[in-house]
Image: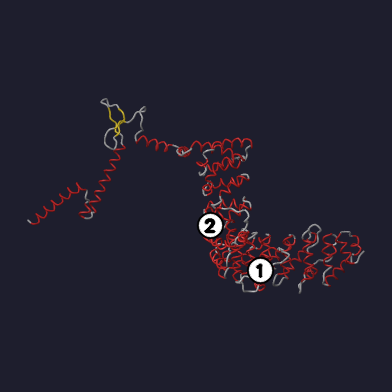
Amino acid sequence: MQRACSKSSRHLQRQVTRITMGSHGVSRKSRFGPKPKDASKRRKGALATKKRGATRFRRKKRVETSPDKTPSAHVVFPKGGQKRKQPSDGEKGGDSKRSKMEEKTIPLASMTKRDRKEMRRKQRDNYELTRDAIRLWETTRRRKIEKSNRDIQIGKLVSLISGHVKEVIFKHDLARVVQCSIQFGNDEQKKCLLKEMKDYLLDLCKSKYAKFTVKKLLKYGDRSVKDEIIESFYGHVKKLIRHSDGAGVLEYAYNDFANAEQRNALVGEFYGPQFALFKDSDVKTLGDLFTRDAAKKPYVMRHLKECLTPLLEKNVVKYSIVHKAFADFFAFAEPAARSEVIEAMREVCVQMLHTRDGSRVAMQCLWHGTTKDRKIIVKSFKTYVKKICMEEHGHMVILAVFDSVDDTVLVKKALLSEISASLDELISDPFGRKVLQYLLYPRDPRTFHPHVVAILKQGDDNPNSKKEAEMRWGELREAVSEPLLKYVSDHAEDLLRNKAGSLFLEVVLDQAAGDVLSAMEAVADVIAQPFDPKSHIVCDAVGHLAVKRLIKHDCERKSPPYFSQLLLLRLRRFSVRNWIATNRGAFVTASLLESHLNDVKSNVQKQLLAVKEKLAKQQTAGALVVKKLLGIP
């Protein structure tokens, strides 16, 4: 009995709850806890079935027929369930959803790929403008087109896009159309296009596609166009240099088209906000600024450091305008601030070696950096050593490494190993040869200009190099001498016939450490080949001078082996007699007669006096010198 009462009370409570939920919107979850899982799944499935059925019903067209079974007007049932008569062709209004879907999907399914592409283009803005501009561009950009015809097409193209430049210039295909108009248009047309773009030039520089339009204006525009673009950068240099696309345009303008005054104005924006707003043509360098007002130095150097340090974390260290700013900083920085910047940039120095200012900055880092800084900088050169050695400015940094880094074991592993593996390329390159010659004979006045030597001497007094310079150079010379002597032995004839190569050969034979006998013998074997007036080395325009210099260098040698003695031992019989028949060969013979070695001089005199009558008939300039040395009238 109690169980039946409890059941009836629970049933009554459920009824009250249903009424309350219907009237006040109280959720079942808030009153009775979470719904049972099975019930919720069944309810969700039922709702999903209802929705699918309703969707099918709405999409389905219902056609009413007249009593004679003929179809009447199409009638659709809208969402509210009421009938709505489909508008006829003459009435206003749209088609049904079914007809709209057929227009969008059914024709596309039957179209070709080209037709579908064209239909997508028609849905874009300025379709007709884009179509006509691209057609004209396809004709104009051809190489084989008459200039008169191209001028006509360019005129049509410029008139077509005028007034719509901003709409088309940021698109990847139409940006090329504008670039073509700038490249082949006349000055008036270029200025007309620039006039439309000048209000948003900075946005163009930061655009992925439009930045090339600015570069075309810089390249093909006249001086007034270049000046207007460069002056538009004033006050925005620090923002542009931090943008990946804008930095490239700024560098292009600064490096290739800006004059000295404009370059100073662009770099000056790193000095402080006032230098970005007020340009002073009288201040050409940072030194001029400090000379005029020394009180500004702490403020300028602090601001310069704050501007440059964040750039080390971005991919803009490679640009020359950044190198110039860093060079100005290192020229006037205090030791503490300089050490902080060196520690921050020691891993990116390798990206700055291709410019003059960048190489000077890297040299400053080597001279004033700690042992740890130098080690990291030298290790960062790995795999790039050959390329650095062959660069006009980069090879100076390698010379600074040889001058300042005391850890010669590190230099041998990181640099000399790659140098020894690339001797063929380095010897054929003018800057690569200087690196090799510096290893053998540092600061040789015959090879290095006094200006270069003066730059390298700036690092001689640095506080972090403890080892004596001669000791450091001697260790590096020993490491590189063996591969160089082997290379000379294998390529003696090629070096003798090359002007720069012959000079390098002389330095190797004179300055290399170790046994140079095998290399000298290889060179002597080339000279001792059977005589041919057309191809012998003593008849060569370059080779005979190289042989003369090698013979004369014997007087500078303090101990054997002497090259002239080795040469006479390998010469065939009557070789010297054959040489005097040619002018160049006679001059080589004269150098043997002038040797300070008595045995060499007497041997040659004995051979020549045996053909005194034949020698007397020779009237070449070289033969006259030989006769004078022998005392033959």
Q: Which of label 2 and label 1 is nearer to you?
A: 2
- In this rendered view, identify the residue nearer to me: 478 or 364: 364
Image location (x, y in percent) of residue 93: 35, 31
* Quadrant placement of the N terminus: bottom left
For residue 480, the mark is: 1
**Label 2 SS:** loop
Tell me the kind of residue under disc 1: Val
Tell me the kind of residue under disc 2: Asn
**Label 1 SS:** helix
| Residue at the image point whose x is 56% and y is 42% from the top | 195
- In this rendered view, identify the residue nearer to me: 440 or 157: 157
| Residue at the image point whose x is 87% and y is 63% from the top | 625
Horizontal relation, residue 200 to residue 259: left or right: left
Image location (x, y in percent) of residue 182: 59, 42
> Residue 609 sits in which quadrant?
bottom right
For residue 240, the mark is: none
Image location (x, y in percent) of residue 336: 55, 68
| Residue at the image point whose x is 29% and y is 43% from the top | 52
Q: How is the image coloured?
A: secondary structure
Q: CA distance from mark 2 to mark 1?
A: 36 Å
User: Dot 1 surroundings within 10 Å: few (below 14), some, or many (20 or more)?
Assistant: many
Q: Which residue is mark 2?
A: 315
- In this rendered view, identify the residue nearer to me: 343 or 196: 196
Image location (x, y in percent) of residue 16: 15, 50
